Amino acid sequence: MLQVLRDHIIEDMTTILEEWGCAAATTTDPIEINEYTDAGKGLLATPIAFQLASELGRPPADIAADLADAFRDRGPIEGIDTIETAGGYINFHIDETFTTQTLERILDEGSEYGVVEGTGTSALFEFSSPNIAKPLHIGHLRNTVLGDVLGNVLAARGYDLVRDNHIGDWGVQFGHLLYEFEQAEDTERFEAEPIDYLLELYQRYGRHETELEESGREADVEQLRDTGREYFAALESGDAELRALWERFSDASRSRFDATYDRLGVDFDTWHGESFYVTESWTSQIRETAIDNGIAIETDDGAYVVPIYDDDLTNVEDPEQADVRTDADIDLDEDDGDYEAFVITKRDGTTTYGTRDLATIAYRVEQGYDELLYVVGSEQREYFQQLFAAARKLGYTDIQFTHVDYGLIDLPEGSMSTRAGRLITAEDVLDRVRENARSVVEENDLTLDEETADEIADGVALGTVRFENIAKRRTKNTTFDTEQATSLEGDTGPYVQYAATRAWNILHEADTDVSEPSAVADQPFNEFDHQLAVRLARYPLVLERCEERYDPAPLAQYLLDLARTFNKFYHENRVLDAEQSRERRLVLVAATVEMFETAFEITGIPMLKRM
RNA sequence: GGGCACGUAGCUCAGCUAGGAUUAGAGCGUCGGACUUCUAAUCCGACGGCCGUGGGUUCAAAUCCCACCGUGCUCGCCA
């Protein structure tokens, strides 16, 4: 609701400044949203008089006074009580109408509150994207939760999204794995614990390679790598036996993934893994286009690469601003070496991840999307810029690319390494948090039956993990600290869940229906009531900010703020046995519950009725 | 070395996109308080800050610009 007032004030201000003939009329959004306080600043305020002072050659306070007059002359703004000036600021104070309208809006719109109508942007949203034959680890956990919540935010902001799990199920690593599997031939173990077994094989290969390297047997290392490459080449050229084996790996991984995603409450619309684009010939099409049109050049040993120059990367994500050099402009013989080589075809003719990513773009463009979003770690930043540049060269010039990058997670003992066995799985984390939660449940309430206690522990575990993974700004690196990641106290999911549960419980305990907000608008609200109502009014601005940043972190911060404000309200104010404000506070609590539910839907944090 | 990120309380982080009101906010930890009350997984108080350093822009800088320092990532015919 605050955004409505903000937009109204900006519109009026622009009109006034235009009438005055001020250049600052074009200034964007100079409205601050302050904390609600009884005295002093208005909830909305603007320091624009300071900006105008030099242009108009008058003191800010005078300008502010004139501006305030001009606002008043335009007639009352619904929701604004008084407009005052103080030290050059213009303060807009809200009135009770605003509070009532906010409550009405939330109760009427429910989960539609804060949602904007479709922008017409259809986007392919890629996230999670684990590799088969390995379990999801805490890195995937961050990606998956961040991606899922961001996807929900964008959908609420009007995007038409297709969520795609771009599974890493192709590449030479599977050549190695197939080779190791054939060597070991322990189908019994595979049937029993497929992923654990494949992980072991993967690590066995890694150890093998490291040993050879360390003992300086370079020829043997090459031999080992060649074998893997040969297996992969055979797989890619359609070897039926290897393909059948690969399918078993893939299927086993899929069921393991499904179990984890189920626990996390994450869904995808499509699961087009990398293999899809190879099997459906999109990679060969890319290869032909690139070679036939002279976009890729052949290297001495028979590979094909697309040369990428530094200035190709400038604003490459934006179709309006991107400006890649086409090969017609380049004399490759003259400035060879001055570019990064984006490999389209390796010397043995097989595809690389770049080929498959280009093929993926080709496919997605044909599907008619306006934008392709990639939730992938920041360690692949440069690669993605190059990928987009290569795609532009191939003629995909109209599509918006967005690499939503995020900081790495490492462990106290160093960066994660699947090969070295330094990894913590997503399931491990969920289990540990659930265990913590379970013991807290028991400490707090011994009357609960087992099943209910388990449900609460599951809900708290999910709330903790989801909150933890979106609360930090996405660009921040993190060191995974088990203690901290599994903590249920402080600025965490359970803190927010607890506030929501308390609010819900008040409604549950009330034996009367919730009134129409306008019918009880004359009941008095104190500062704590208003503080809470103002938080409710802020929510649409928060979603707006999440979209601008492609980051759900502001929403998590908002939930903390809302929970903190509610807990204070809860402590200071009685609702059900309030003397004068019972019905109006009940409305306020009902709106708060609605607000929690709406935000929980987006963040995927479970709403618990007891905890 | 080039590129990209990050640097705010002992620790983990908000605030920076779009600069504003001589009070820079949370949590953890430490110390001290509050349950005959709609759930104490809560609340209140205390302690704790040259907002990495140095310049610049501005009436106004944690916020914008430049340089430097520190940390991480990256610069594979791996993904």
Image (cartoon, rainbow, N blue to C red):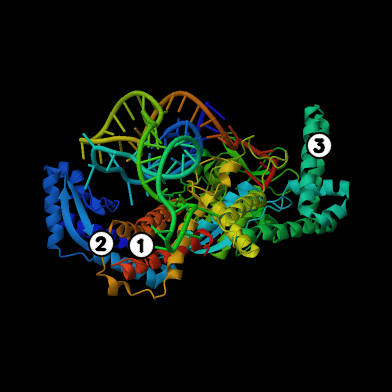
- Number of other residues with Cα within 10 Å of mark 2, as a class: few under 14, some 14 to 19, many 20 or more: some
Q: Are marks 2 and 3 in contact (CB under 8 Å)?
A: no
Q: Which residue in the structure is indicated by mark 3?
A: A208
Apparent side of residue A352 relative to residue A527 in the rendered image (left or right): right
Q: Chain of mark 3?
A: A
Q: Residues within 10 Å of mark 1 (few under 14, many from 20)?
A: few
Q: Are marks 1 and 2 on the same chain?
A: yes
Q: Quadrant of the C terminus of chain A?
A: bottom right
Ranked by sequence position, the earlier of labels 1 and 3 is: 3
In the figure, A590 relative to A32: above or below? below
Label 1 with label 3: CB-CB less than 8 Å: no
Which residue is under mark 2? A8
Looking at the image, which is closer to me, A299 or A463? A463
Q: Quadrant of residue A415?
A: top right
> Spatial distance from mark 1 to mark 3, Cα to Cα?
68 Å
Q: Give the structural element (helix, strand or loop) at label 1.
A: loop
Which sits earlier in the primary sequence, circle 1 or circle 2? 2
Asked where in the image residue B63 lies, by quadrant, the reply is top left
Q: Amino acid at mark 1?
A: Arg
Say which amino acid is labelled 2.
Answer: His
Q: Residue at x 33, y 71 (%)?
A: A583
Chain of the residue on which disc 2 is drawn: A
Q: Nearer the viewer, residue A588 or A5?
A: A588
Chain ID, mark 1: A
Depth-wise, is mark 1 or mark 3 nearer the camera? 1
Q: CA distance from mark 2 to mark 3?
A: 68 Å
Q: Nearer the viewer, residue A506 or A204?
A: A506
